[in-house]
Amino acid sequence: SITAGYGLDLSQAYPGLIQKKIDAQGWHFKVVNAGQSGDTSAGGLGRLDWVLQNRVDVLVLELGGNDGLRGLSVEAMKKNLQAIIDRTKERYSEAKVVIAGMKVPPNMGSEYSRKFEAAFTDLAKRNNAPLIPFVLEGVGGARELNLPDGIHPTAKGHEIVAANVWKVLEPVLRSLNKRSS
């Protein structure tokens, strides 16, 4: 739902803001927002064939938050995310993957939180993929940057999320753009 821009116009969600940054660079990458509100890693895996119908140069994998909010198995989430990476690489061997890390509220318990957060770091290391440590850095828990539900970013919050993503994504896109020039 973060990627999907829950509660906002799609142009205000961070994928739309990333597209504006790409366009400002004059690069020919098209952002496809495959986010779906309420989606889990299993749901994302189930929808992957739809995503892979389009050429994928870079996959920004921002899934797992809903798994964590529901207290679902961290191992199952990790397995689903790895399957998404593997299937993407099978279809587009040159595709780059960027992992967007997530955190869960403290009510899930410290052991669950530790395992959950470590899953993203582990996936990044295993796949030699750049990691956005916490996609909601500077936004999560900041009342003024979230909708009344306290979970989904406002338009201003999405600007910060876009900056968090861009910090890691921009060098990946820059290297791909140089190769295609």
Image (cartoon, rainbow, N blue to C red):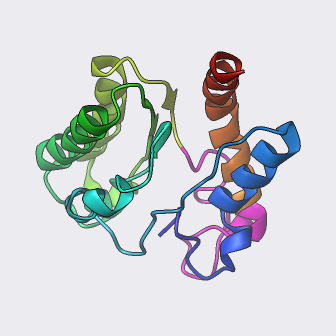
Tell me what residue is drawn at x 72 percent, y 53 percent. 19
Asked whether the viewer can see residue 111, the reply is: no
Asked whether the viewer can see residue 73, the reply is: yes
Classify 76 as above or below 35: above
Tell me what residue is drawn at x 54 percent, y 58 percent. 32
Q: Where residue 113 sits: x, y (%)? A: 30, 44
Q: Is residue 71 left or right of residue 118?
A: left
Residue at the front extreme of this rendering: 181
Main secondary-structure element of the magenta-colored stretch: loop
Classify 122 as above or below 138: above
Quadrant location of the C terminus in the rendered image: top right
Classify 78 as above or below 3: above
Q: Which residues are magenta?
A: 135-157
Locate residue 167: give its quadrant.
top right
Tell me what residue is drawn at x 12 percent, y 48 percent. 76
Q: Where residue 48 sits: x, y (%)? A: 28, 57
Locate residue 137: give its quadrant.
top right
Tell me what residue is drawn at x 35 percent, y 34 percent. 92
